[in-house]
Amino acid sequence: MFLTLWQDWLYEVRYLSQDKPWPALDRWLKNWFRQQERLPLELQSELSAACYDIFRVLQKIDFLETSYQAKNIISEVDKWDLSWHCQEVENHSARDFVAWFGILFPEHNFATQLTCEARQTWYSSEFKPKWRGQADAESIQVILNGFRPTWLPLLVQRQLISNWDDGKLIDFIKSQEKTPPLWLRADPKLYNELKTSLYKQGVKVALDDNGLMAVGGKGVNQTQEYKQGLIEIQDYASQQIAAAVMVKPGQKVWDACAGAGGKSLAIASKMNNKGSLVATDLQSYKLDELKKRAKRAQLHNVRAFAWDGESALRLPNDVAKQKGFDWVLVDAPCSSAGTWRRNPDAKWRFNQSDTDELVKIQSGILENAAKAVRKGGYLVYATCSWQVAENEAQVADFIANNPGFELVEQKMLGAPDVDSDIMFVATLKLKQD
Ligand SMILES: C[S@@+](CC[C@H](N)C(=O)[O-])C[C@H]1O[C@@H](n2cnc3c(N)ncnc32)[C@H](O)[C@@H]1O
């Protein structure tokens, strides 16, 4: 069954789509499952897990390609499919390898056996000894942990600006190998109570200094507490971005790129329904979900409407009266590189020129959103990316063009320090004069 799935993936994505970007794996899988005759849900989730696992393996193919190109042909390569010609090696994608591997080693039965542990054994006992010393150590580290060697300069930029030593950079790179847990947002006063109750309902929960997380078992969204709005699924780093908006009840906030409202809800929950939160997004369908979630969480001071980011927002009357918002959050559209731990297929669709385009969009949204901050108010800029161009460089550019703003703080959030997505947040203040 698994190989059928992969062959379909190869055919549809590789041969039919040709040079088009890969479709998102979750959407592709959903569609594939729909076309099968009544696949039991358990099998569907097993097949999905195996696919995600394999997307984490894809970088090994890059390594094989590198070795192959360097003519350090390891013995496994001898067995490669005959269609794998040396001179074409750069044109072959990682997906070829996956199919080839599955066909050559059917006993590996990806769907049931390719657990992290099995992969580790495979690397260390069979693979590693063969390639040791055949490529430079830095590239190997990068490749083995899910990055392309061509991304090394991006990683080095991150290391320099974050002042990381080599050990920290390696921890960062290694964090890519693992999916983070599902972090839950709730009132910290209720953590212990929730932990017990969710456990009873079949959700495996863990609690540490950084908060509450689901680590397996039944889906959180089936629980009473979720239905009552007492818990929300929200990554640790994302919760920290919302925490950077230190709003007080009665103040006015604008969440300019609110999407389905993950951060809007977390921010509004600190306002005791006093003051107001305006949530906007380019995509109004996302705001429909935000409205539903706000209702479930009994947040009555949230207004949501579409805004395209291309002009200044017309301030609502109450906000105009105080000459702008106290807080404006720009949770900007970005490369999402910081969420590759959860969506490993996305990194294979990543293209540096997309980042260049995004940097321009982010800059336009920031400029327009900044016009709505009152004097003495704050502009919070965030992304779910670790790329310097989208973060520190973007902020530096903004301040150079808008000297009325001063930087209060900027930081990276999440992995490798915390087992979560990786995000960035900067707080800027509009000076009084
Ligand atoms: C990182 S997501 C926001 C996630 C959201 N804040 C949350 O916590 O769930 C970025 C959002 O920016 C929106 N967006 C993209 N281009 C935009 C634009 N030009 N103006 C305003 N929003 C835009 C996207 O629709 C997307 O929902």
Image (tube, helix red, strand yellow):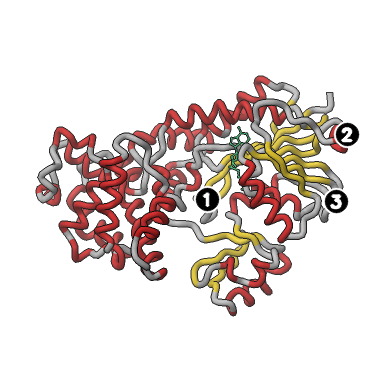
Query: How many dots with numbers?
Result: 3
Residue at numbered disc 3 = 274
Mark 3 Cα-neighbour bin, 10 Å: few <14, some 14–19, many ≥20 = some
Ligand 1 within 8 A of label 1's CB? no
Which of 193/140 is in front? 193
Residue at 50%, 42% (x, y): give it: 336
Q: Tell me the CA gap for discs 1 and 2.
A: 36 Å
User: Pointer 1: what residue?
Assistant: 421
Is 236 displayed left or right of 252 in the figure? left
State the residue position of label 2: 322
Q: Secondary structure at mark 1?
A: loop
Answer with mark 3 or mark 2, whichever residue precedes in sequence.
3
Res 113 quadrant in image: bottom left
Question: Is residue 429 depicted above or below 77 in this figure?
Answer: above
What residue type is disc 3 on?
Answer: Lys
Quarter of the picture holding the N terminus: bottom left
Mark found first going from the N terminus, 1 or 3: 3
Residue 314 placement: quadrant? top right
Label 2 packing within 10 angstroms: few (<14), some (14-19), many (20+) = few
Question: Do tag 3 and tag 2 residues touch (Cβ < 8 Å)?
Answer: no
